[in-house]
Image (cartoon, rainbow, N blue to C red):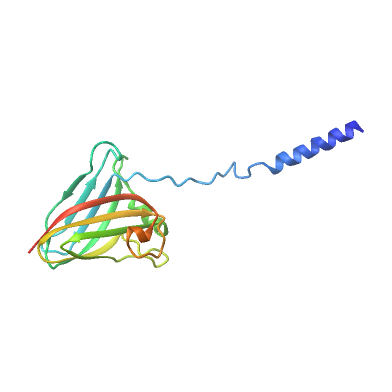
Amino acid sequence: MKTTKFLALFVLGGVLLSSCSNDDEGNPEPVNEEETITTIIVTLSGGMNGDIILRSQDLDGDGPDAPVITVSNDLEGNTTYTGTIQFLNETESPVEDITEEVEEEDDEHQVIYSSTGSIASVATTDVDGNGNALGLTFQLATNTAGAASLTATLRHEPTKPNDGTLAGAGGETDATATFDLLITN
């Protein structure tokens, strides 16, 4: 009788242990790690001065050094520019283009633009696979001469659709840069 009880407990223990095993041990779920974005490049085309390049480079990330912001030229007043944005990780060799991942995971990303001063409007011109704003391409229209700023923020897992503002999009910021601009006539 004791042998029978012992065997029953032994079998029951084996069943419990096997039912608690992790079937995913051989195929763990991949972790989508946050990418390092050191550089944001905005290219504005359409003015008489040729392409204008806005660049924010922060090679030490959250380190003590501020990003280095450069603007290749002034913008022209009363002009509509076609814009593109690119995100890079320049700590890798060769440089990793994070823009490709943003495109592949377009339903999980959105670039939000905000502006001040002599910028009349900024409007996203591309959409994700679900028809919601993505923001890798956009149009920027200037007003008359004056100072302006353009901020580009890459959001991860925003609420879509949204009103095109940071508050309306929610999600987490992957990268952001503000460019101080001068609009000339």
Q: Residue furthest top?
A: 2
How far from the left and from the top, in percent, is residue 138? 26, 63
Q: Is residue 2 above or below residue 23?
A: above
Camera-nearest residue between 69 and 180? 180
How far from the left and from the top, in percent, is residue 72? 14, 52
Q: Is residue 92 left or right of residue 118?
A: right
Quarter placement of the N terminus: top right
How far from the left and from the top, in percent, is residue 61? 30, 40
How far from the left and from the top, in percent, is residue 160? 41, 63
Look at 20% across and 52% down and name the residue there: 179
Q: Residue furthest left?
A: 185
* Quarter of the figure with residue 25: top right
Q: Is residue 76 left or right of residue 166?
A: left
* Quarter of the figure with residue 67: top left
Look at 75% across and 38% down and name the residue there: 14
Look at 41% across and 55% down and name the residue there: 157
Camera-nearest residue between 161 and 20? 161
Q: Residue furthest right?
A: 1
